[in-house]
Image (tube, grey):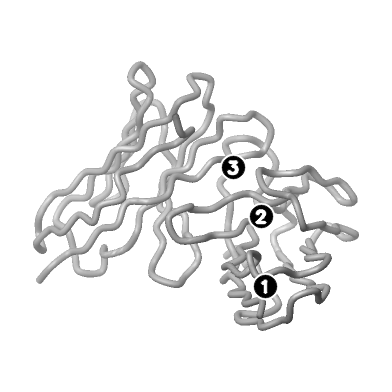
Amino acid sequence: DVKVTQSSRYLVKRTGEKVFLECVQDMDHENMFWYRQDPGLGLRLIYFSYDVKMKEKGDIPEGYSVSREKKERFSLILESASTNQTSMYLCASSFAGSNQPQHFGDGTRLSIL
Amino acid sequence: RKEVEQDPGPFNVPEGATVAFNCTYSNSASQSFFWYRQDCRKEPKLLMSVYSSGNEDGRFTAQLNRASQYISLLIRDSKLSDSATYLCVVNSRGYQKVTFGTGTKLQVIP
């Protein structure tokens, strides 16, 4: 069974802090993704990576960066957290190929005060 | 026009009923299609892929209509446990990027 693990289920941070969200997958998937999900807006892609040290911007990359130093780990970084980054953050992974489904972690509910 | 559109619902149906959802997509070059299920405050989970010829998994049937650019999900003999939000997913950008619909909420009533 695919296991995608996110480091925290709930996180509270302050405006201006640097925030790290970690994601680890155990299926040797090539692709990894970071989304945020907000009511009425659905899932929006922030960044994705199709290989170690490779990254591509998604639909809403502003205010975020990512790091993929190892195949199994994909980190999302909020450089200077702001209140509009309060959201549910979901990590996903998949094998390479456009017909491969993504598998999600449990999500991190992040609140920025 | 949104890339992927779904009726948000909610669809309130009695147990045992048959219910169907559609999802329209705008890019005729879209390549792959999926249905996910998301329970309240949980992560999306893959329900089924959608194949060109249509496919069935127990009580669930998925169809693809390329000419009209929509996919559908049919649930027969609805159970209380089917209550969830159903997300359609369309890969329309080629390499590895997918677009999620905002979901259709289903509530199965005893």
Q: Earlier in the sequence, mark 3 or mark 1?
A: 1
How far apart are labels 3 and 1 at the CA level?
21 Å
B48 or B43: nearer the viewer: B43
Secondary structure under tag 1 reads strand
Amino acid under disc 1: Gln
Residue carrying label 1: A6
Rendered location of residue A62, percent (x, y): 75, 51
Report in which chain the residue with disc 1 lies.
A
Crowding at dot 3, Cα within 10 Å, few <14 / some 14-19 / many 20+, comes out as some
Q: In the rendered image of this protein, does residue B26 appear above or below residue A96? A: above
* Position of residue B84 measured from the top left corner of the image (x, y, whole percent): 32, 63
Tag 3: amino acid: Gln
Left or right of B63 in this view: B43: right
The one nearer the camera, B102 or B20, is B102
Measured Cα–Cα span from mark 3 to mark 2: 10 Å
Q: Earlier in the sequence, mark 2 or mark 1?
A: 1
Identity of the residue drawn at 38% across and 67% down? B39
**Which quadrant would residue A26 be assigned to in this image?**
bottom right
- Which element type, helix, strand or loop, lies under badge 2? strand
Q: In this rendering, would B97 be left or right of A23?
A: left
Quarter occupied by residue A96: top right
The disc placed on residue A93 is 2
Q: Is residue B39 left or right of residue A20?
A: left
Disc number placed over residue A100 in the picture, else none: 3
Q: Chain of mark 3?
A: A
